[in-house]
Amino acid sequence: MNLAIKKWAPWNWFKSEDKQSEQTVAQVSNHPVQQIHNNIDRMFNQFFNEDGLMGAFSPISQTLLKPSVDIGENKKNYLISIEVPGVDKENINLELVDHDLVISGEKKNEIRSDEDSYHCVERSYGYFKRVISLPEDADKETISADFKNGILKITVKKNRLIPKKQNSKRIAIS
């Protein structure tokens, strides 16, 4: 019986993103003085927005902005869709770093006048970054992207890898 190991252990598309998150947490928690420094920075960032005014409308928006990702495949391609509603195409950066696809950008806050009064603000603004680790058979040279109606669609063609032949040799037992 031949077991397909790949079916039991699927590709971890977010292994680089997870590793970066772990490193960030480790860096923050290493030293008590560093923890205090980071907490003070976070409080100031929450209290003041980019215009220097009180940021009561988005106290933790920068830490929560993480666009949703759908990843699929067909016989020829890997298909990646990322939801980025309210973000202009010019504010999205897509780059390949080693074997990781890095999607970053910014959802800019709307300019509000002093006369406006809000009762509820639920939309998030700020920077976002997603790191998608591509499988070994992804063709890095054929990545294409299309942006329409707040959805970034990325297509990555698959390489037709020839499975490596296992060289085996019988060893005599004496």
Image (cartoon, rainbow, N blue to C red):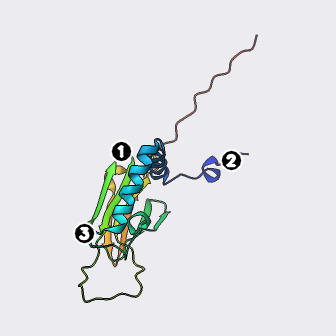
In this view of the protein, can residue 1 be seen by the observer? yes
> Residue at left 55%, top 34%?
165
The nearer-to-camera label among 1 and 2 is 1
> Callout 2 environment at 10 Å: few (<14), some (14 to 19), or many (20+)?
few
Could you tell me how far apart the alpha carbons at marks 3 and 1 are, in whole angstroms? 38 Å
Q: Nearer the viewer, residue 117 or 13?
A: 117
Look at label 1 and name its amino acid: Asp
In the structure shown, which secondary structural element does the residue marked by tag 2 occupy? loop
- Looking at the image, residue 77 sits to the left or right of residue 105; the answer is right
- Looking at the image, residue 39 sits to the left or right of residue 174; the answer is left
The nearer-to-camera label among 3 and 1 is 3
Q: Is residue 146 above or below residue 130?
A: below
Circle nearer the N terminus (3, 2): 2
In the structure shown, which secondary structural element does the residue marked by tag 3 occupy? loop
| Numbered label attached to residue 52 | 3
* Residue identified by numbered label 2: 3
Q: Quarter of the image holding residue 121?
A: bottom left
* Residue identified by numbered label 1: 98
On the image, the x and y values in percent for residue 174 come to: 76, 10
In the structure shown, which secondary structural element does the residue marked by tag 1 occupy? loop
Q: Is residue 134 above or below residue 108?
A: above
